[in-house]
Amino acid sequence: MINKRDFWDKSLIIIQVLSLIIIPIILFIIGHNIEKALSDREVKAKYIEIAVSVLNQTPNQKTEALRNWALEVLQTYSEIKLSEDALEILKSTSLSHSYLTDESGNYIVDEKGNRIIIE
């Protein structure tokens, strides 16, 4: 007949051995999932960076397909989606603007203090 104390001692040893095996495996899986999530976010950020650089260029017929790709990237990877109106504007307008400056490089502004955009 098995003594209750022996039974609990053996059970405790089995639990300790299993925890020595299972805990590192669980920690490895959690660490791997965190690493993958961070890597995915980094890749998405790079795609958005490339898309924005494409949209900074002056649009023309040669770059129309590339601009459409860039807009699709922004819609896919951005947490806040662009409206249809914003997408239509970005298809034909550059994100970057050139501003009118004087000889010293100072921005010239209108009567409201807004920089004057060179088109």
Image: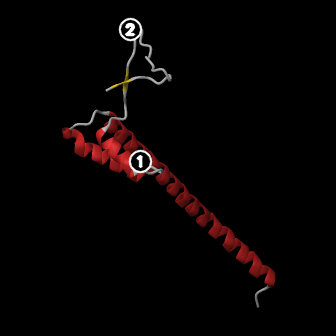
Residue reaching furthest to the bottom: 1
**In what quadrant of the picture does the C terminus appear?**
top left
The amino acid type found where label 1 is placed reads Lys
Sequence order check, earlier mark of 2 and 1: 1
Marks 1 and 2: in contact by CB < 8 Å?
Answer: no
Residue 73 vs residue 38, the one in the foreground = 73
Badge 2 marks a residue whose secondary structure is: loop
Q: In the rendered image of this protein, does residue 76 appear above or below residue 3?
A: above
- Label 2 neighbourhood size at 10 Å, few (<14), some (14-19), many (20+)? few
Please report the residue visible at 76 percent of the width from the left and 87 percent of the height from the top.
2
Give the label on residue 97, or none: none
Gap in angstroms between the C-alphas marked 2 and 1:
41 Å
Please report the residue visible at 28 percent of the width from the left and 47 percent of the height from the top.
68
Report whether 31 appears left or right of 55.
Answer: right
Please report the residue visible at 32 percent of the width from the left and 37 percent of the height from the top.
93
Q: In the rendered image of this protein, does residue 37 appear above or below residue 92?
A: below
Residue reaching furthest to the front: 111
Residue 78 vs residue 93, the one in the foreground = 93
Residue 75, horizontal then vertical, whole percent: 39, 51
Give the label on residue 44, or none: 1
Residue 90, horizontal then vertical, whole percent: 34, 42
Residue with the mark numbered 2: 103
Badge 1 marks a residue whose secondary structure is: helix
Residue reaching furthest to the top: 103
**In what quadrant of the picture does the N terminus appear?**
bottom right
The amino acid type found where label 2 is placed reads Glu
Residue 115, horizontal then vertical, whole percent: 44, 23
Report whether 14 appears left or right of 2.
Answer: left
